[in-house]
Amino acid sequence: MVQSVTYHRETKSVPFQGKTIVLESLTPVLSPKEKETRKKEIERCLYEVFSKYRPAGDKRC
């Protein structure tokens, strides 16, 4: 089943090199359970990436 996702929209106009640029940020509106699930997945993926660059003798974490 495909679930539709709604987004919170934040728009800002900022000057850049003499011109006005419109920046738009879309953030998904998620339930607390979905937020926690996504947060854990992101943390897991980041751990995998950064653990590759940990010095060989480093036993932390």
Image (cartoon, rainbow, N blue to C red):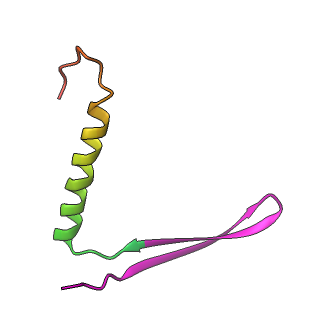
Vertical comparison of 36 with 50: above or below:
below
Vertical comparison of 34 with 48: above or below:
below
Vertical comparison of 22 with 56: above or below:
below
- Residue 24 appears at what percent x and percent y? 56, 72
- Residue 11 appears at what percent x and percent y? 57, 75
Magenta span includes 15: yes
Q: Where does the magenta region start and end?
A: 1-26
| Residue in the image at 21% along x and 47% along y | 44
Magenta span includes 32: no
| Residue in the image at 83% along x and 62% along y | 18
Q: How many marks?
A: 0
Residue most extreme to the front: 1
Residue 19's image quarter? bottom right
Q: Quick check: 8 left or right of 45?
A: right
Residue 46's image quarter? top left
Quarter of the picture containing the N terminus is bottom left
| Residue in the image at 70% along x and 68% along y | 21
- Residue 47 appears at what percent x and percent y? 25, 40
- Residue 27 appears at what percent x and percent y? 40, 71
Quarter of the picture containing the C terminus is top left
Residue 51's image quarter? top left
Vertical comparison of 52 with 31: above or below:
above
